[in-house]
Amino acid sequence: MTDSVASLAAPANATPIARSPGYWSNVVRRLRRDPVALAAGALILALIVMAILAPWISPADPFQASMLKRLRPIGTEGYPLGADELGRDMLSRLMLGARLSLFMGIVPVIAAFVVGSAIGILAGYAGGWTNTLIMRVVDVFYAFPSVLLAIALSGTLGAGIFNAILSLTIVFVPQIVRVAESVTTQVRRSDYVDAARASGAAPLTIVRAHVLSNVLGPIFVYSTSLISVSMILASGLSFLGLGVRPPEPEWGLMLNTLRTAIYTQPWVAALPGVMIFITSMSFNLLSDGLRSAMEVKE
Amino acid sequence: MNGFIDARPPAHPDLGGPAQPLLSVRGLVKHFPLKRDFLSRRGGGAVRAVDGVDFDVKKGETLGVVGESGCGKSTTARLVMQLIGQDRGELVFDGVAVGSRALALREFRRQTQMVFQDSYSSLNPRMTIEDSIAFGPRVHGSRAGEAITAARSLLGRVGLDAQRFAGRYPHELSGGQRQRVNIARALALNPRLVILDEAVSALDKSVEAQVLNLLLDLKDDFGLTYMFISHDLNVVRYISDRVMVMYLGQVVELGPVDQVFDAPRHPYTQALLRSMPSTEPGVRTETAPLSGDPPNPIDPPSGCRFHTRCAQARAACAREAPVMTQNDGHAVRCLMHQPDSGYAASGALS
């Protein structure tokens, strides 16, 4: 037996096996043909690079206030995007603010993706009472509008970045659980899962080998569409004083502190909002592109 | 065997000798409870999908299972495979009760495999062909290289060039090719019993014939036993040694294929066979041999379950439930064939 296996292995190596590109390389190939998704992706990448390098590439000190140079318009000498209500350089503050804004857009979604996928896949694969129990609890959270829930949780937990991230995560977990549960239930009913069960595989092995590869994609796409929501909610929390505290720059908070200047310097006051708009739009477009690249029926 | 090298896990030894049935099914019952209506408090009944099924599968035979859709064929297959649990009844595999300490479910599953009807949905779309085939052996402890080698030689054995197909994904294959892959996957664990649940029903006629012949070859080469479920009577006649006819969750006739097809005893089997289109232009079936749909399996008819559609039914048929009566290896569940029944003395069905 052993000899025959060895002798078979040799010719099998000699003539190579024709390999098809895997699913993900097909997704990447389709994504590369989508100019809108590519542009959005490039913009997001640029924003992330800008955020990381902000302390080194920003033209001025974002915390350096000057009473004499308050609320300068866009294009002022030394202040390319104007100055805020305390005379701090807007460009530098927007660059540094990208850090916290992106952070608070992405981190809650990643955390909710991990937690929500685990709970949703458990509910979907176990079915029965486990499913009913989990999904009814999720429904309770679902009953509240997400803005209200985020504010209520943040308000209860107290202001601060960590609490804001925690409350945003709690807001997103039920939504991801729902998606994860529905795709997992679909996969669990398929014949290939039955065939795997018939081969004697343990539930955990089946989840790892057959379920994850088929459900993580759709859950991931849904999660990316939540990033923009998360950014906007985080900005909202900061605007209300429940997220980032001054003087730390964050787009939502900057929008708040500049709102008094809306009649004197409307363009400067709108800049943080423009950034939030561009960023969340880019995430949505990328998510849409990803969805259409992954939804091709094969 | 045209250069086929068997690198699969070794087969389980025969335990009880050739005379002992490979699989004995006794008193198998599966009722699917209906969801109770929350507001009106109706319901509480159950779909009696499989309602007291007994049969044996002999070593080395092909047992054909036929019946209308909804008669419990597929549920029986899934119960035998233990994909769903039975409410009552037991399975005895080569003399050992399935699920007992002597034959754990995991070991039973290594000896019994199944091929499903839908060739596409029974393969994981994210897995290459060879990984799908190698999955079972890997679960049972084969090393990765060994399992892949075995998978590739099995691909060759089911008529697919391993060089061309091993690294492909299911959507790149045709229906017939995919069903060959499914057969290879079922054989990868070196099973003794293979359940073919409408395995060729979705294929084109020409491909169907090829796959049927492949199944016959594989059966001889690997000493397999088949349970072949189909609604296609011609195919069942071609491939089976014995035939089991099911109606509304029960076995109504079970016997050697030629006896059942040439001299059917149960009126339902007779009607089923009359429903096959004739191959002679002069002999045509002018009237439908069976009228109406099968009765509701939630509330099956009293007495003989077939009496509502049976041309020969008498009053006794609505009262007395027939039992399986065996006569030279050919069993039938009908009062006409039951010596002590009240059929002969009974008046017409009201």
Image: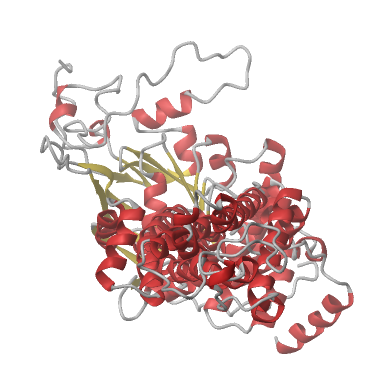
Left or right: residue B70 versus residue A195 is: left
Along the line of sight, which residue is nearer the eye, B222 or A279?
A: A279
- Residue A157: x %, y % from top left: 28, 72
Left or right: residue A296 versus residue A201 is: right
Report the residue at 82% width, 69% height from top: A17
- Residue A149: x %, y % from top left: 30, 58
Q: Quadrant of the C terminus of chain B?
A: top left
Left or right: residue B110 versus residue B159 is: left
Q: Residue furthest left?
A: B41
- Residue B45: tell me if it is visible: yes
- Residue B338: x %, y % from top left: 23, 37
- Residue B81: x %, y % from top left: 42, 61
Q: Using the rendered view, name the quadrant where residue A179 is placed.
A: bottom left
The number of discs equals 0
When the figure is inspected, residue B120 is found, relative to residue B128, above or below; the finding is: above
Q: Using the rendered view, name the quadrant where residue B48 is placed.
A: top left
Along the line of sight, which residue is nearer the eye, B146 or A166?
A: A166
Q: Quadrant of the N terminus of chain B?
A: bottom right
Left or right: residue A189 versus residue B318 is: right
